[in-house]
Image (cartoon, grey):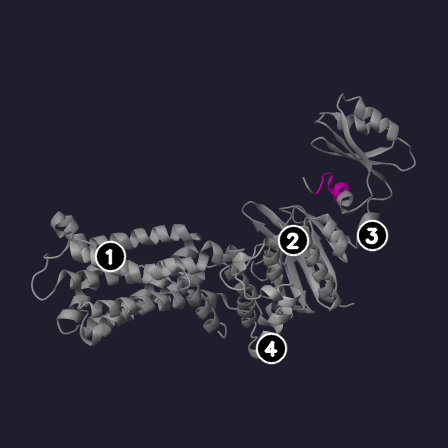
Amino acid sequence: MKSLPTLVRRDARNMIIRPTFLFYATGFPLMMIFLLGLLSQGFYSGPMSSWDVVAVNLLLYQALLSCSMSTNSFLERTLKAPNLRVLFAPVRPLDLLLSKVLASTLFCLGGFVFVFVVLEVLGVHLGPLCGLEFFGMIAALSLASSALGLWVVCLVQDESGANMVLNLGIGILACTGGVFFSIEHFGPVAAAFARYSPFTWLREIAFKIIWNGGDSMGCIATMALSLVAAVAFLGAARASFKTEDFV
Amino acid sequence: MRDILTVDNFSKSFKTGVAVDHLSFSIPKGSVFCLLGPNGAGKSTTIAMLASLMPRDEGRVFFDGTEVRGRPARYLSSLGIVPQEIALYGNLSARANLEFFASLYGLKGKTRADRVAEALEFAGLSDRADEAVDNFSGGMKRRLNIGCALCHKPRLMIMDEPTVGIDPQSRNFILDSIRRLRDEGTTVIYTSHYMEEVEEIGDDILIMDHGKTLAEGTLEELKSKIGDLRHYRLELDAKVPGLDDAFYRVSGMKRVATSGSVFELESLPAIDNVDAIIKTASGSGRRIVAFSSVEPGLEQVFLTLTGRSLRD
């Protein structure tokens, strides 16, 4: 346990020094928000602008993509061997796994802080207190996603394979949840998918938090469920992780 | 001299077959113990089990008289492991790598700074300490790979083929550093498939193949296992099927091993049969490229024990 802060610092720094990761956490969501906001201008009536809607959708989507960071920090080609050396030391394997989850969550949260500030400056509405409640929801989702990524990479034992599986799953979730466009007008089956997509549920809570004076219960429920999921995924990752697979 | 490590009946199987098969050995304190064997002999699996990274199917290990179970911190703190692969952060400096890995063993502050400086000195990298590892040559990376296992002053160093793919200068540096470690009282386990290295530094040598012990002892003890046969090496310009049978018909011939167009011959010393060997080779219709009498070494020991060359 003593080594955990050292491991987290190292893993977080390994992410920060990579320009591609920095872009992925900051530039990519801003770029997507700008593009989709521009394309959907005039789609929404009332006080909400297209930027307000797209920003919420894509920030939720980005939170779910946090898993890519943890898979990378665990099994990426240049990081696998140093991770093996960590296991030579008197470090609990759980600490190695936990450090990946915490570091990728912290890194992603740093990216979200930057994105929130930029959006706030640009006048995108993210809710009261500069979107603090919404930010809490995003943070919890990011933690759960990081833990999920670690579990999948422990199962698949291949970074690119794990990312493929995760991106596919999250992509389907996002599409059915209407992140990029609404699928409800594709017929009753698509509408049912959209209705029961967890992403739709997340979007509804987020919009209530931001526009309807808050949905504290929904927000707390999301955070609590995310925390439980994070613990469960981390436990599953520890159960799947065999130190000999690293050799 | 008391043993620092005792391995009793180590066994490990994978779906593909048996990797380590009832391996037992003991290592005296302050010695260099070499595990010699071809690729796939089970050396790295043995190291992984010693490092508590891989559970064993069977067997026990005792460190300083105490049985090791699971991943006890005291045992892991006493080990310094140099993996076959370069296990460093390429984008960090040599110093930052050493500081990070040293901190995992609880070193901090001035103690850590002093140990890092010592490790840099040991690896011959003091003047490049703040340069990113990605800019280093293969040999420098290998040396730093060893340095990172040294910072916490382990009592037992385990080195898994640390000289693979490096230049002769760095190789000599590493072999010298192993001697220095031994002189300072550190016990070293050194795995390799390079006989010359093992002959150079090994106090005790265990030759293994297919996960099993073939022979164990000092270099002299191992050489004595092959008796006082004469050893010849003969190379033709091409393969000749069936020529080994012809060599067996030469008077005094005890063993013939072929590897392509190269023949390793072992013959009784009392019988003068060099003429007959050359005549047999010439009679094959191929040109003799080289013929020499070979000083017995680990290669011959391996050949005698397995009937094939270590390099096969």
Q: What whole-number distance in Å separates the C-alpha atoms at marks 3 and 1?
A: 72 Å
Which one is closest to the eye, mark 3 or mark 1?
1
Task: Say which residue label 2 marks.
Answer: B163
Q: Are marks 3 and 2 on the same chain?
A: yes
Q: Which mark is residue B220?
A: 3
- Residue B262 sits in quarter: top right
First reached walking from the N terminus: tag 3 or tag 4: 4
Q: Is residue A119 magenta?
A: no
Which one is closest to the eye, mark 3 or mark 4?
4
Q: Which mark is residue B55?
A: none
**Chain hosting mark 3:** B
Q: What whole-number distance in Å separates the C-alpha atoms at marks 3 and 2?
A: 24 Å
- Residue A56 sits in quarter: bottom left
Q: Is residue B306 magenta?
A: yes
- A21 with respect to A88 (left or right): left
Mark 1 vs 4: CB contact within 8 A: no
Check the image and report above or below for A50 versus B298: below
Instruction: Tell me the residue at 77%/41% (across/down).
Output: B304
Instruction: Tell me the residue at 54%/57% (across/down).
Output: B135
Q: Quadrant of the C terminus of chain A?
A: bottom right
Q: Are marks 2 and 1 on the same chain?
A: no
Position in image of residue B186 (x %, y %): 71, 67
- B14 with respect to B163 (left or right): left
Q: Which mark is residue B111?
A: 4
Within 10 angstroms of label 2, few (less than 14), some, or many (20 or more) residues?
many
Within 10 angstroms of label 1, few (less than 14), some, or many (20 or more) residues?
some
Mark 3 vs 4: CB contact within 8 A: no
Residue at the limit of the structure toward the left, as seen here: A46
Check the image and report above or below for B227 versus A140: above
Magenta part of the protein: which range? B302-310
Task: Say which residue label 1 marks.
Answer: A32
